[in-house]
């Protein structure tokens, strides 16, 4: 079997066994696009409600739509562990062609840019995992400070 076929077999085994915990390291490496879509669909549809699936990956776009929480670590240990919707309330993810002055992080894309800004209104925004990851490792202190400010303002 190919590398991708072996990974699909392991995931099918997990689904069949209905395990409570599943640890995956780069689960979509070696899979073609249709297999990645099938992976997401199968994992979301057939995992038990009380199961915990821990995915370590750099292929963030492959899992972005199926995750509930994000854990980002630095060399000292856990630094950020929050539900994805809470991150989208603490930070505002903007998609635009113009760079914002209040942006903590700006990442240029072919169609414009994604920016991470403080979110004092705590308006719900869709978290861009790739930008969050890059901001965490590129400007961690500023990112965490923006999250903290948004959290403090909402408590008042």
Image: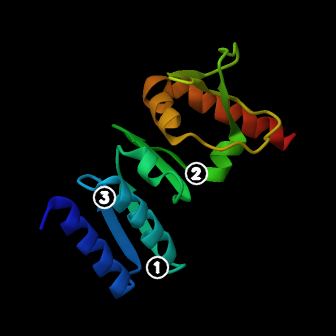
Q: Residue furthest left?
A: 1
* Residue under numbered circle 1: 46
- The nearer-to-camera label among 3 and 2 is 3
- Which disc is residue 79 wearing? none
- Marks 1 and 3, the one that precedes in the sequence: 3
What residue sits 37% from the left and 80% below the top? 15
Residue 27 is marked as 3
Q: CA distance from mark 1 to mark 3?
A: 16 Å
Mark 3 or mark 2: which comes first in sequence? 3
Cα separation, mark 2 vs mark 1, equals 24 Å
Which of 38 and 11 lies nearest the eye of the viewer? Answer: 38
**For the point 82% across and 43% down, which residue is it?**
155
- Asked whether 77 or 97 is in front, the reply is 97
Disc 2 or 1, which lies upstream in sequence? 1
Query: With 79 as the anchor, is 145 left or right in this view?
Result: right
Question: Looking at the image, which residue sits at the far front?
Answer: 34
Q: Quadrant of residue 76?
A: top left
User: Mark 3 packing: few (<14 Cα in 10 Å), some, or many (20+)?
Assistant: many
Residue 140 placed where, x, y %? 50, 28
Q: Is residue 119 left or right of residue 36?
A: right
**Residue, disc 2:** 82
């Amino acid at each position: 079997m190919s590398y991708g076929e072996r990974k699909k077999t392991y995931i099918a085994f997990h689904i069949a066994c209905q395990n409570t915990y599943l640890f995956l390291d780069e689960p979509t490496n070696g899979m073609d696009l249709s297999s990645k879509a099938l992976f997401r669909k199968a994992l979301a549809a057939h995992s038990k409600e009380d199961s915990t699936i821990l995915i370590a990956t750099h292929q963030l776009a492959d899992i972005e739509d199926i995750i509930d929480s994000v854990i980002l670590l630095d060399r000292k240990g856990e630094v950020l562990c929050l539900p994805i919707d809470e991150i989208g309330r603490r930070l505002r993810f903007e998609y635009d062609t113009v760079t914002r002055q209040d942006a903590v992080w700006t990442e240029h894309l072919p169609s414009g840019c994604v920016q991470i800004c403080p979110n004092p209104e705590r308006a719900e925004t869709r978290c861009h995992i790739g930008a969050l990851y890059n901001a965490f490792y590129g400007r961690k202190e500023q990112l965490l400070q923006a999250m903290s400010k948004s959290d403090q303002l909402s408590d008042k």
